[in-house]
Image: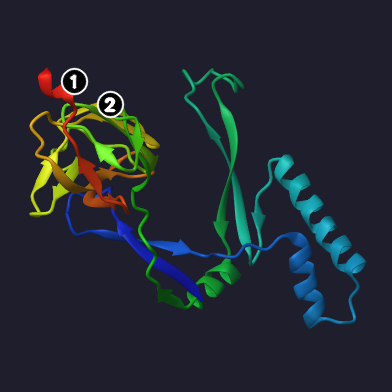
Amino acid sequence: MLSYSLSENQLTAAPNDFKAVPVNVRSFNMSEIVQRIMARNPGLSPAQINSSIDEFFKEISIIVGDGGAINTPLFNTQPSIAGVFHGAADTFDARRHRVKTNITSGTMMHRATDEIRTQKVQIAEPLPFILEVHDVVSETVNEEITPGGVLQIRGGRLRLITENPANGIFLIGDDGQDVKLPTVIENKPSRLIAMIPADLPTGDYSLEVRTTFSTANRETRTIKTGRFNRELTAVCDETTESL
């Protein structure tokens, strides 16, 4: 059974296009494959199986290394040469040309692929997360924020696409109104530093980081929100207030 989840398709312009991404795909090494063969063929020893497989691999490598093509029920190979030749008299130059081996599925692989059953699963989308909020003026952590001061946020997946107005650091008051921190001084995946508006009213606030930045170094179509799990209290500082 092949499990898959759906993810935004960044290669198309349509806003509602998604692509399937296989998840939890188990891989098998040679030792595990040998054990599975033995389970079906108890009369064979690991040494016999490994010897036959090794000889098969060696012969394939010799044929490919000699420029030959392979045609088996499992896979097919065909050599090719990449690079541009300048004129009919030009010859192979390792600095400009490269020999490649093209591999395609054989009939047995095609049949096995056709038999794969699929199931859709829901995968939790990776979201920004906030571990610590440091108010530079009051020198408090996870407690106060100072209007007109500087806020340092540590966590993960925090980087903002600053050109997108939907991205940003937001304070949400008890009345549900959003206050966006207008100036971001440092913008990194693990740390944000921003200025707190000087006219921020005193009171309790929730802190959110909203970003469309993805871990694949590109912008997604959907906003990902990370909310700090503690309330922060805005307290006017006499120094910043006098300024």
Number of other residues with Cα within 10 Å of mark 2, as a class: few under 14, some 14 to 19, many 20 or more: some
Number of other residues with Cα within 10 Å of mark 1, as a class: few under 14, some 14 to 19, many 20 or more: few
Residue 82 at x, y percent in the picture: 52, 32
Q: Circle 1 sits in a helix, a strand or a loop, which is it?
A: helix
Mark 1 vs 2: CB contact within 8 A? yes
Residue 11 higher or lower than 31, as above or below: above
| Color style of the picture | rainbow
Residue 145 at x, y percent in the picture: 24, 36
Relative to residue 198, is residue 127 drawn left or right?
A: right
Q: CA distance from mark 1 to mark 2?
A: 9 Å
117, 16: nearer the viewer: 16
Relative to residue 214, is residue 74 drawn left or right?
A: right
User: Which numbered disc covers residue 215?
Assistant: none
Q: State the residue lying farthest toward the front.
A: 238
Residue 94 at x, y percent in the picture: 61, 22
Residue 169 higher or lower than 9, as above or below: above
Occupied quadrant, residue 143: top left
* Residue at screen point 30% across, 50% down: 228
Occupied quadrant, residue 34: bottom right
* Residue at screen point 46% across, 71% down: 3
Name the residue tied to disc 2.
137
* Residue at screen point 48% across, 75% down: 114
| Mark closer to the observer (1, 2) | 1
Name the residue tied to disc 1.
239
* Residue at screen point 79% across, 58% down: 56
Quarter of the rendering occupied by the C terminus: top left
Q: At label 2, which amino acid type do we have?
A: Val
